[in-house]
Image (tube, rainbow, N blue to C red):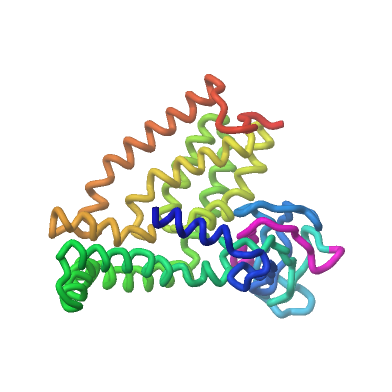
Amino acid sequence: MLLGIAGLFAWTIPQDSPMRSPGTTAFEASGEGMIHSLYVDDGDTVDVGQELGIIQIFHLQSENEDQLYYEPVRKDTMMAMEEGVIHFAKPDLREGSTLQAGEMVATLQGSRDVTAFDAPVMQSIVPLIFLLFVIPGVIYGFLAGTFKNSQDMVGSMSKAMGSMAYYIVMAFFCALFIDAFGNSNIGTLIALKGAGFLESLALPGALTIVGIIVLTAVVNLLVGSASAKWALISPIFVPMLMGIGISPDLTQAAYRVGDSVSNIITPLLPYFPLVVVFCQRYVKSTGIGTLVSMMLPYFFIFMVTWSIFLLVYWWIGIPLGLQASYTFP
């Protein structure tokens, strides 16, 4: 009921209210680079979560005027965080266009959605959720007789947060590890080298799909972000499999199988420390190693089972989804 009231409140906010999104999102190059891919045209209407293009970031390896060599660093994916119309900063912008650091690439004119990421009401979502639950909780506590005074209320909150101490400490060190590992680009290197190796094997379609599942599961141990992994390996896998008649829909389905089954065994999963805390409610000695070793059998069982499911779906011809296909074109 409380969530329904909150939804009704959000729905009744006027379109010109300052609590809504300002409606314009800018996409800038985070470093010197070039347009790697563009998936939309100027003036196109895009949906929430739709990929707009990929920017290849690089740095100058040699300053010799006779021979300039640019070493790729990473690929940044431009993604729409709300519905709107895309407008390119330059009329001649296309794949291969060079960019300077901080250069404007495009702007997204949104619909002033109250649920947009940059809307003030969404920026304040944490205190709003806190008030949404703490006010009814305090009222219920006093009416039920659980709370006699403010000390009882504070004591109840302290008890609830006591179980989060392990998570807070672990999350701090996990954040440092993830940041250091991300800056090392080891995950990116393994993803690109692995995809190139799989392409060089020239395996049949079914074996290639299984190879994508296995490679994605391995890369997931090193790169936690699902969108980052897809941005790294999709420019290699999608065109390669389209060349042998396999649709991008099937390629992404294989990627999702490999990504999902290995989430529970990768410490880079953002929710991994929280899972450890939940396990400690029942087994106090649970740690990262305990959880990984306990989940390994499930990882192998699910990876084999879901891989078979995907191949059987492909063999029988059961649709992957609305307007999804297995073959290309």
Quarter that holds the C terminus: top right
Residue 231 placement: quadrant: bottom right
Residue 327 position in % (x across, y down):
65, 29
Q: Which range of residues does the magenta coloring cover?
A: 70-92
**Looking at the image, which residue is at 54% across and 24% down?**
318
Q: Residue furthest right?
A: 92
Q: Is residue 224 above or below residue 211?
A: below
Residue 234 position in % (x across, y down):
60, 48
Nearer the observer, 38 or 3: 3
Q: Is residue 31 above or below residue 221?
A: below
Residue 290 position in % (x across, y down):
20, 54
- The reply to whether the magenta stretch includes residue 208 is no
In the image, is 322 to the left or to the right of 41? left
**Looking at the image, which residue is at 78% across and 79% down?**
65
In the image, is 65 to the left or to the right of 19? right
Chief secondary structure of the magenta portion: strand
Q: Is residue 289 above or below residue 70?
A: above
Nearer the observer, 296 or 77: 77
Residue 97 placement: quadrant: bottom right
- The reply to whether the magenta stretch includes residue 85 is yes
In the image, is 302 to the left or to the right of 278? right
**Looking at the image, which residue is at 77% across and 68% down?**
98
Nearer the observer, 303 or 214: 303
